[in-house]
Image: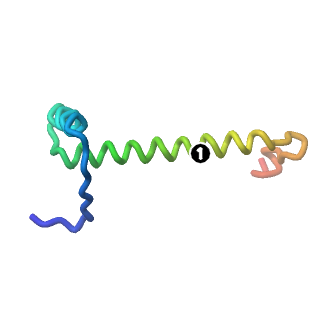
């Protein structure tokens, strides 16, 4: 059955191909589904690293004296 999802062709080392194949077999999913899930996890991890970096930069410039209180922001 044809799919409407975009396709991505990649070239990997034999050892990486083998490892993804083993992980796919353990989860009883296809190689492409396991590769997709691993890519998704890697992107989420990369996004987390970005936001951690952003938080660290903001924390360095944070001034508690200039910060708004909870009540000032939410009215409670």
Q: Is residue 30 left or right of residue 65?
A: left
Residue in the picture at 85% in, 39% down: 64
- Relative vertical location of residue 4 with respect to residue 63 in this rendering, above or below: below
> Residue 75 at what x, y percent from top left?
79, 51
Q: Position of residue 69 (x, y in %)?
A: 82, 44
* Quadrant housing residue 51: top right
Report whether 65 appears left or right of 50.
Answer: right
Counting every numbered tag in the picture gives 1
Can you tell which quarter of the image residue 60 is in? top right
Q: Nearer the viewer, residue 21 or 15?
A: 15
Q: For label 1, count other residues whose C-alpha is less than 10 Å away and answer few (under 14), some (14-19) or many (20+).
A: few
Left or right relative to 70: residue 28: left
- Residue 63: quadrant of the picture: top right
Where is residue 35? Give x, y as percent: 26, 45
Q: Which secondary structure, mark 1?
A: helix
Q: Residue at x 13, y 66 (%)?
A: 2
Give whichever of 38, 63 is nearer the camera: 38
Q: Which residue is mark 1?
A: 51
Q: Residue at x 73, y 45 (%)?
A: 58
Q: Which quadrant would the N terminus be assigned to in this image?
A: bottom left
């Amino acid at each position: 059955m044809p799919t409407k999802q975009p396709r991505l062709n990649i070239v990997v080392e034999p050892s990486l191909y083998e490892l993804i194949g083993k992980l796919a077999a353990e989860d009883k999913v296809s190689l492409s589904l396991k590769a997709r899930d691993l890519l998704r996890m890697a992107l989420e991890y990369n996004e987390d690293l970005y936001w951690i970096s952003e938080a660290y930069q903001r924390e360095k410039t944070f001034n508690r004296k200039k910060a708004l209180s909870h009540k000032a922001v939410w009215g409670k």
